[in-house]
Amino acid sequence: MDTSRLKRRGPCAWELPATGRMRVPGVIFASKELVQEMDDKVAEQVANVASLPGIVDASYAMPDAHWGYGFPIGGVAAFDADEGGVVSAGGVGFDISCGVRTLHTGLKEADLRAVQKPLADLLFARIPAGVGSTGALHLSAAEMDAMLRGGARWAVKAGYGSEADLTHIEEHGCVTGADPAAVSDMAKKRQRDEMGTLGSGNHYLEVQVMDEVFDAVAARAYGLAVGDVVVSIHCGSRGLGHQIGTDFLREMVVAASQAGIALPDRELACAPIKSALGQRYLGAMRAGINCALANRQILTHLAREAFAALLPGARLPLLYDVSHNTCKEETHTSADGHKRRLFVHRKGATRAFGPGHAELPPAFGKVGQPVLIGGSMGTASWILAGAAGAEERAFGSACHGAGRAMSRNAALRRWHGRDVVDELAAKGILIRSPSFRGVAEEAPLAYKDVAEVVEAADRAGLARRVARLRPLICIKG
Amino acid sequence: MNGQTFEHEADVGVRGCGATLAEAFAGAASAMTAVICDPAAVVPRAPVEVDCSAPDAELLLLDWLNALVFEMATRRMLFSRFDVIVEAAADGVVLRARAWGEAVDVARHQPAAEVKGASFCELKVERQTDGQWLAQCVVDV
């Protein structure tokens, strides 16, 4: 990125001054190296978001920001409904509430090594993954609507997991205001056979070992110690969320054109929050969030069953569940000192509430929200903690992952899936995937080094580094 | 194949070219299959009818690709041959097509990633200076 038009605000914060149609400045949280590596399109997209009606304070980009559609991936923006603010289907994206959850196992690395291969095989057999896979659960129309209203709460009632899980999920596992009637029949049809499926692409279930602690107090609060084995699940709202994104992006683009609104980029398709279309999208998008939460809850149950089959007595309590493609109504104090209700879009960005936030479970109140950052297979994932003052920096948001270092085509030209699986096995990491081509496209070096990203998030005061996780088993879609 | 993929930092672009709009749309659909697997591995055994209408050709391309995404997801199929007709209509453009393919066979097709949806990013349908039609956009994977 050409940094000549950026003003340095701090060691890891850069301001893009408001010019032209921008209503507020842009702020990019990144080290000098990371900001220089970013594509110029990121600045262009940050500026485009800054031009949307009702935006508050600034258009933000997280340290892992890269070229997305409309919003950059790693983009955060909040809108005030009372000031003509908008909700944007493009600002949430296709994979509504894609996110990460991490489970404790109570095991140490040596315990896991003893069953590593049969566990990898069993998880691969039990977790539906990859293109064309289906889940064991097939919902009736009434059950689908109940799931869309209830999220993980519905899944627990249906026998997937326990009440204790719900306190460790954002919004206690169920976003209010979901409107199943706003979700198209096509979206529901796409989801009919996809409950409890992992998906494909960059989605995974990993068994990981915590290999380094950076914040002992927060690690203790999260119940983590060096050598602990955890399970992390990365996936989203499956076909239902993808179809909601497709349906509303088109409808918002056409509506904007008919209303004479010139969007700087059609992918910024949006509608006033206080419009019928805006409200309908919010109802559908919240149903999509609940679908993702229910999906991760079912996958959790399947992982628990697999562990119990090989390690009788193993319990896998939930550490936390975060979503990173959402628009959520939250209370924040804006830069003018006013406390107000805002619609915070996080596109490829994680909510990262700091210590003392009322939304957090009591056990995390003093240290802040766990922020779960996925790496690539073969490289580390991270657990961060929402930093004190994070709410004032970017509405309590942080990064979500590494971002690709090269395109899928380039990765495919460079690696063979079989070789990647063999090389990682030699390093003690077992990969199970239905597709060698998929493994090649997701090869570890196809992604940027997430360590640099989380260090920048830490230095920017968004989230503190707590622990690093190294993969042992990876189930890829 | 009149279709090819192009680079995007996070996802993949699909592009079709041809002497007619219909050929370009068929090429873009072939390119979308190439995002998922090798189109040559997909046997065109059975047809699926797809009809779309839109106010303009760019929205029609989006609707066409998204209709295929829906059919792939709900029928658990992949497509490799596309018979496409595009015609002007009183209120825009319409497309009638037959997409030929078969059920997903994971071992044989080795599908790498499902397409979540076609986006407005890099969306372009236009006649080039050489008279050829181009139809392209980025798809989310």
Image: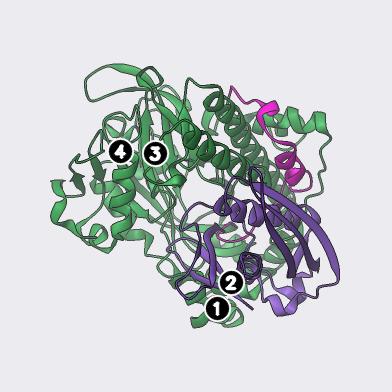
To which quarter of the image does residue A58 belong?
top left
In space, the residues marked 4 and 3 are separated at their CA atoms by: 14 Å
Q: Which residue is mark 2?
A: A439
* Residues at discs 4 and 3 both on one chain: yes
Mark 3 vs 2, N-terminal side: 3
Q: Chain of mark 3?
A: A
- Left or right of residue A281, residue A324 in this image: left
Q: Residue at x 65, y 37 (%)?
A: A291
- Circles 4 and 3: CB atoms closer than 8 Å: no
* Residues at discs 3 and 2 both on one chain: yes
Q: Which residue is mark 4?
A: A50
Along the line of sight, which residue is nearer the eye, A421 or A400? A400
- How many residues crowd around disc 4 within 10 Å: few (fewer than 14), some, or many (20 or more)? many
Colour of chain B in the rendered structure image? purple
Q: Residue at x 80, y 75 (%)?
A: B43
Is any atom of residue A366 visible in this view? no
**Residue type at mark 2?**
Val
In space, the residues marked 1 and 2 are separated at their CA atoms by: 7 Å
- Circles 3 and 2: CB atoms closer than 8 Å: no
Q: Which residue is mark 3?
A: A262
Q: Nearer the viewer, mark 1 or mark 4?
A: 4
Q: Is residue B8 above or below residue A225?
A: below
Along the line of sight, which residue is nearer the eye, B12 or B112? B12
* Residue A446 x, y percent position in the rendering: 45, 70
- Left or right of residue B136, residue A213 in this image: left
**Residue type at mark 4?**
Ala
Along the line of sight, which residue is nearer the eye, A114 or A187? A187
